[in-house]
Amino acid sequence: RKEVEQDPGPFNVPEGATVAFNCTYSNSASQSFFWYRQDCRKEPKLLMSVYSSGNEDGRFTAQLNRASQYISLLIRDSKLSDSATYLCVAYTGGFKTIFGAGTRLFVKA
Amino acid sequence: NAGVTQTPKFQVLKTGQSMTLQCAQDMNHEYMSWYRQDPGMGLRLIHYSVGAGITDQGEVPNGYNVSRSTTEDFPLRLLSAAPSQTSVYFCASSGQGGSPLHFGNGTRLTVT
């Protein structure tokens, strides 16, 4: 079983839609969590950190459920420019950062 | 702000050749790492360093060597290239464990 698992998608949604990505992690000792965005043939870039209390950044909301070892990312009012791959990331300590394989999102006009 | 700089951007090697991928960061980060990214596999850690003179193996270290003589530089050496090493390689750095990673632009390597 992979340490961080994501639905690979692709998710195909129209502009303006709300889309949710889910991610599970297997190591209960994981300490911090992130969502990264990766555009085609580019490097991953930090989208947002994920906190137990949940956090929001504009149209993006991230949630963490430690009991279920589950992380989510909600994108509201999808834009064409949101089309990318979204990577779920867990830091398990000792400089060990584990990436999920990513979920592809296509937003269409 | 240069951030993390990787060179070259593209490279084609023949089986058995050796080469070094360069990585430099100007953020005074202690932690640096190398990942490879293959379709459907996500990013996998090759080697990492927590400071000058200190390196350790990640998930897929075989066929690769690293060294860290300065805080800024963390080169990755392919000793004898194999087609299985065809991949996209990313160098990353962070200020401390648990902090977000800053990535370089990547090196696309093809081994024929």
Image (tube, coloured by chain):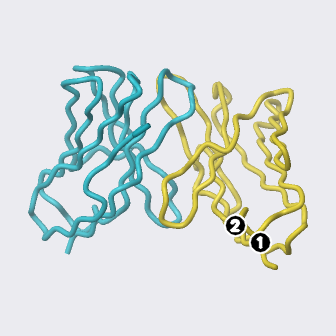
Chain colours: A yellow, B cyan
| Rendered residue at 33%/27% (across/down) | B49
Q: Confirm or deny contact between disc 2 and disc 1 (CB under 8 A).
A: yes
Residue B6 image position (x, y, % from top left) = 32, 48
Tell me: B8 left or right of A58. left
Local secondary structure at mark 1: strand
Residue assigned mark 1: A107
Residue drawn at (20%, 32%) of the image? B67
Q: Which residue lies at the image location 40% right of the left edge and 26% below the top edge?
A: B31
Q: In this view, does A59 lie to the left or right of A84?
A: right
Residue B27 lies in what quarter of the image? top left
**Chain for disc number 1:** A
Label 1 environment density (alpha carbons within 10 Å; few <14, some 14–19, many ≥20): some
User: Residue at the location (41% across, 46% down)?
Assistant: B104
* Subunit bearing disc 2: A
**Where does label 2 land, which residue?**
A83
- Where B12 falls versus B71 (above or below)? below
Pick whichever of labels 2 and 1 is earlier in the sequence. Answer: 2
Which image quarter holds the C terminus of chain B?
Answer: bottom left
x and y percent of residue B68 in the render? Answer: 23, 28
Placement of A64 over or under B95, stated as above or below: below
Q: Distance between the residues labelled 2 and 1?
A: 5 Å
Q: What residue type is labelled 1?
A: Val
- Indicate the position of residue B18 as horizontal and vertical percent values: 11, 56
